[in-house]
Image (cartoon, rainbow, N blue to C red):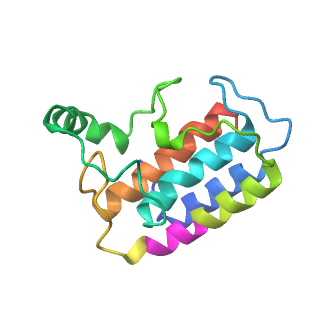
Amino acid sequence: MKSLFDETTLSEIQGRIESLTETSAPLWGKMTVGQMCTHCQMPLELAMEKRMLGSGKKPGFMKRMLFKLYKPLMYNDKPWSKNLPTVRDFIVSETKDVTAEKAKLSSLVSEFHQYKDKTEFPTHPMFGKFTQEQWGKMQYKHLDHHLKQFDV
């Protein structure tokens, strides 16, 4: 699995983001391209401690066990399925300016890449601890999933 901490992968993702246009249409799902760019900013912000999920309340025992089973799917080599449910806090329903949101996303991707030498990351509110390698792969996998959604 590629990682956003890799220079070549960073360049690839930045180019794919840049190729999005106002007329980019999803191959699946309900988000517009502007909403997708906004949505993709949120997990990056979470990893950089610029955003929190929900009330900050930890999931109960059963949810923690379920999340533990799904955790490896977040960063392994298997692509995510189309039309996966979106975390409630990451749903974007309002209209978004594509140019502005692309610029914000690109900037956050570059900022996240600067964390490549960081060894301590925040605990994910649902999945728990991730290593630096897992965070890099997970962020790439999420972006790749949504850029493929818009055929880039």
Image coordinates for residue 47, horizontal then vertical, percent: 42, 61
Report if residue 54 lies within the magenta region. Answer: no
Q: Who is closer to the viewer here, 152 or 98?
A: 98
Q: Residue at x 78, y 57 (%)?
A: 100
Image coordinates for residue 99, horizontal then vertical, percent: 82, 54
Image coordinates for residue 8, horizontal then vertical, percent: 57, 62
Give the quadrant of residue 116: bottom left
Q: Which quarter of the image is occupied by the C terminus?
A: top right
Q: Who is closer to the viewer here, 7 or 125?
A: 125
Report if residue 112 lies within the magenta region. Answer: yes
For the image, the number of numbered tags is 0
Q: Who is closer to the viewer here, 116 or 30?
A: 30
Q: Residue furthest front?
A: 55
- For the record, the magenta segment spans 110-115
Asked if residue 46 shows in the view, the reply is yes
What main secondary structure does the magenta stretch of the protein show?
helix
Q: Residue at x 51, y 68 (%)?
A: 113
Q: Residue at x 68, y 41 (%)?
A: 35
Seen in the image, is 66 located left or right of residue 41? left
Placement of 25 over or under 53, stated as above or below: above
Q: Residue furthest right?
A: 23
Placement of 10 over or under 147, stated as above or below: below
Image coordinates for residue 89, horizontal then vertical, percent: 48, 43
Q: Residue at x 29, y 72 (%)?
A: 120
Asked if residue 2 shows in the view, the reply is no
Seen in the image, is 5 located left or right of residue 123? right
